Amino acid sequence: MTFLARFFLSRSRCLLLLVWAMGAGAVQAQMGAWTAHTSMREVVAVAASPEIVWAATTGGVFGYDVTTGAFDRFTPVEGLSSIEATALAFDAARSHLWIGYQDGVMDRLDVQTGTVRTIRDIARAGQFPNRRINRIVVHGDSIFVATAFGVVVYDPVREEVRDTYSRLGTLPPTTAVHDVAVAPVPGGGPGLWLGTDRGIAHAALATVNLQDPAAWTVEVAGLPGPDPVVHAVAGFEGRLYAGTPFGLYRRQPDGRYASAGVTGRAVTDLHVAGDRLFGVERFNLFVLEPGGQGRLLQADGFTEPTSVMTGPDGNLWFGDALEGLVAVATPDAVATKLTVLQRLVPEGPFNDQFVDMTFDRQGNLWAGEVGAGNSGFYRRSPDGRWTSYLGRFFGELAGTGRYTSVHADAQGNVWAASEGGGLVQVTPEGTLVRYDSRNASLLPASGTDNFVIVGGVASDPDGTIWATTRASPRPLHVRTPDGTWTALPPYTGQGLTFASTAYGRIYVDAFEQKWIVIRNENNLGQIRGLMILDTGGTPTDPSDDVFRFLDEEGGAGRGLPSPAVTAVVEDQEGLVWIGTEEGLAFMINTGIVARDPNNVPSWPTWADRSRGTFTLFGLRINGLAVDPANRLWAATNEGAWLIRAAPEGGYDLVAHFSTDNSPLFSNTVLSVAVDARTGQVYFATDRGLLSYQGDAVAPAEKPGDLFVYPNPVVLADGDTPDIIIEGLVQETEVRIVAPHGAVVARLSARGGRVRWDGRDLDGRLVPSGVYLVIAVGQNNEGTAYGKVAVIR
C-alpha cells in the first residue's frame, strides 16, 4: 500500500486527532497579533471602581483587582486611542472609565466588557490650539472635562457635548482649567469651582447660561503670584481648598485665600474621604483633619506622588511618577508616617525609549535606551519578564546612562555601549563587568577624567570584541578572547585625518569586515559617512589593514543616498544593506569590499513602479533587520516597512505599518528587531515598544514532522484564513494534496514558516477533507509531511 493510500485511509481517525490538536495549537501566537511592552511605572492619575484600582500612566492604563491581585492592561493594542493618558475618572452609574489625553481625545472604557469607545469632539475643536484634557469629573449625568481652553460638559447618556465654558468672568478667553469641583457657592446651592491658570472661577449650577462670562465670579485675592495657577480644587467642611505651586490655600468667608499651613510645596491633587481631606505635594501626602488641622504624611514607598484616592479596599492609593501604584493604610488622627502595604507596577521595563535592540542565543531581547537620568539597558526574557539594568538597581552601573548600542556575541555575552559610562559586559552567568579607562584601552573624552563615549560594539565569531569611541585620540578598540585590550589609532586618508576620531555604530559582516559609521569630530551630532575596514589576519596590528571611506552623496541609483549612515545589516544572500537619512542602498558582499573601489552602493528599486523608482527613497532609515525569510524590515520616521526581492526583479512591499493601520504608538520607529525563533517583530517607537507576530521563523536544520495550525480549519464562503505551516527548512516547495490525491496548491517558502490561504490553484476555498502537506527541501534536505483538516 502506498504512503498516500495509507494516509487517506486513516483520514477519519486523523480528523479526530486534529480536533484535539486544535487545543494544542491555541498556544501559538495569533498571526498578525500585536502586543504592547510599555512601562507603566509613571502614574499620572488614579481612579477606583468596585474591586479595581485604576491608574493612568505614560504607557497606557492598567487596573489592579484588589481581590484577585490580577492586572488588566490597556494600550492602543487593546483599543485605546493613545498611551499617554492625562486624566482618569470612574463613572459608577454606567461602569465606565473615562480617559483623557494630551490631544483632547477621550476614551470611554466599559470595565465590564473591556470595550473602548473613542470620543473626538474635543480633539476636533480646531479653534483652540491646545486641547489637552487636564481633569475629568463625573457628576450625575454630566462629565465635566477640564481642558486647556475651559470646561467641556459631556452628556454620557446622549453621548454628545452639551456645553463648553471657555469665557469665564474677567479671565482671558480660553484660559486653561486644571480641575473642577462641585461644591456650594457663596449664594447657596451647588456650584462649579474651577482651578485655572489665573485663579479660581465659580458659578452656581442652577445658572441658566453658564456660557455667559457674567455668570462666573473670579477670585485671586490671597492666592500666590500675580497670575495664580491653581492645579487642584476641593470642597471640604463648607470651605474651598486650592492646590497651587506654592502650597495649599483655604478660602476665607470674605472670598480671600490664605495658606492652610500644611505645606509650601506644589500641590497637584486633592481628595475628600469622609471627614478628611487628603492631598499630594511634591514629596509627600498630607491630610486635613476635621476642623482644618493638617500634617504631612511620609512613607518610604514613594518618591514623586502625583495623585491620591480611596480604594475599594478602604486603603489610600496613590500614583507615583517613579514607583507606580502604591497602597498605604489609612492613617489614624495623629500619624505622620504611612504604612506601605503594596507597591505595584505591571511587568515591563523601567523606561522604554529604546534606540537599539538585539536577541541573544537564548531568545532574550536586549535593548539600549536613549535618555538622561535613569536611562540604562534592558533584557526581556522569552517568558516576558523584564530586567532593567539601571544604576538604581545595579551598583556597577551607578552614574552611567545612555546605553545606545547593544550586542550579543556568539559566546553568550551581551555588551552594552554607554555614551559616557564606557562598555558593560553581561556574562552568560549574569555577572556585570564595566570597562572604561581604568581596566581597558577605552580612553576618556578629551578634558575629562573617565567620561568614556562608546559609540558602538560588535564581535567576530571567535569572541573578539570591537568597540568604538568618540572624542578621544584612539577611536577603535579590540578585545581579544584572552581579555587583552588594544587601542588602535584613527585611520587616515580618503578624507580622514588624525583628527577624525569620532567613530560610531559598528557592524561585522560574514567576512569579518567592519562597517563603521564615522561622525563629524567637530559636531558629534552629524554623520560624515561609512568606513569599510578589513583588519587582516592580525586584529591588534593596523599595519596590514585596508579600508574604504564612503562620504559622498550619490545619485541616479548609485552611491549612498546620503552620507549620513544610520544602520547596516547583512542579509542571507550576502547583500549588505545600508540605511541613511535619505533612504536605502545595498552592496554585494564579495568579501573584499574594503579593497575594491569598483564595488559601490546601489539603490533598490520597486518592482511596481507605481510606487516610484527607488525603494524607500527619501525616508530616514532609523534601523534595519532581516527576518528568517530574508526579507528586510526598515524602521523609519514614517512607520515600519517590510520589503522582499521580487521574482521579476526589484522589490515588493510586503507590509507598511503606521498609526493609520496598526496600533503603533507613533510613526517614528527608532529600531526594529526580529526574534527568529518565534517570528515576533519588535518595534521601538519614540513613545514605547510593541511587537507584532510575523510569519517568518528560523528554518529547521533538517526535515521533520510539520506543525500545521489552526487544525482543524473551519471555513465559510468569503473567509480569508491564515493556515500556518511550520518546521520547514531554509528553502522549501510546499504542496497541498487533496484526499483524492491531486495537488491543489503550491507554495514557495523561505525560512521556517509559510502561510496557506485555504485556496486551490484557481483561488477557490478548498472543500472539506483531510489534506496532506508535503514540504520538499530545495537543497536536497529531504521531504517533510504534515496534515490539516478542513471543515466547510
Image (cartoon, rainbow, N blue to C red):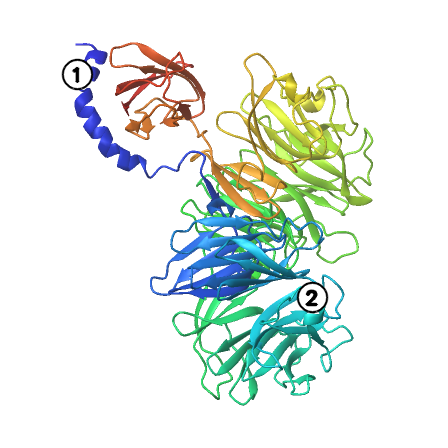
Residue drawn at 49 percent across, 43 percent down = 365
Single out the residue that lies furthest toward the front: 208
Residue drawn at 63 percent across, 85 percent down = 260
Nearest to the eye among marks 2 and 1: give it. 2
Relative to 489, residue 165 above or below: below
At label 1, which amino acid type do we have? Leu
Tell me the tag on residue 741: none
Residue 261, by quadrant, is bottom right
Percent coordinates x, y for residue 444 in the rendering: 72, 52
Side of 736 relative to 595 (left or right) = left
- 10 Å crowding of disc 2: few (<14), some (14-19), many (20+): some
- Along the line of sight, the residue nearer the viewer: 532 or 306: 306
Tell me the SS state at disc 2.
Answer: loop
Look at the image and tell me whether residue 57 can be seen: no
Circle 2 sits on which residue? 212
Relative to 734, residue 176 above or below: below
Residue 651, by quadrant, is top right
Percent coordinates x, y for residue 507 in the rendering: 62, 34
Side of 290 relative to 479 (left or right) = left
Tell me the SS state at disc 1.
Answer: helix
Percent coordinates x, y for residue 697 in the rendering: 44, 30
Question: Where's the N terminus, which quadrant?
Answer: top left
Disc on the earlier residue, 2 or 1: 1
Side of 131 relative to 632 (left or right) = right
At label 2, which amino acid type do we have? Asp
Question: Where's the C terminus, which quadrant?
Answer: top left
Circle 1 sits on which residue? 9
Relative to 8, residue 42 above or below: below
Percent coordinates x, y for residue 715 in the rendering: 32, 26
Estimate the spatial distance between the alpha carbons at disc 2 and disc 1, rounded to whole Å: 83 Å
- Along the line of sight, the residue nearer the viewer: 543 or 126: 126
- Along the line of sight, the residue nearer the viewer: 33 or 195: 195
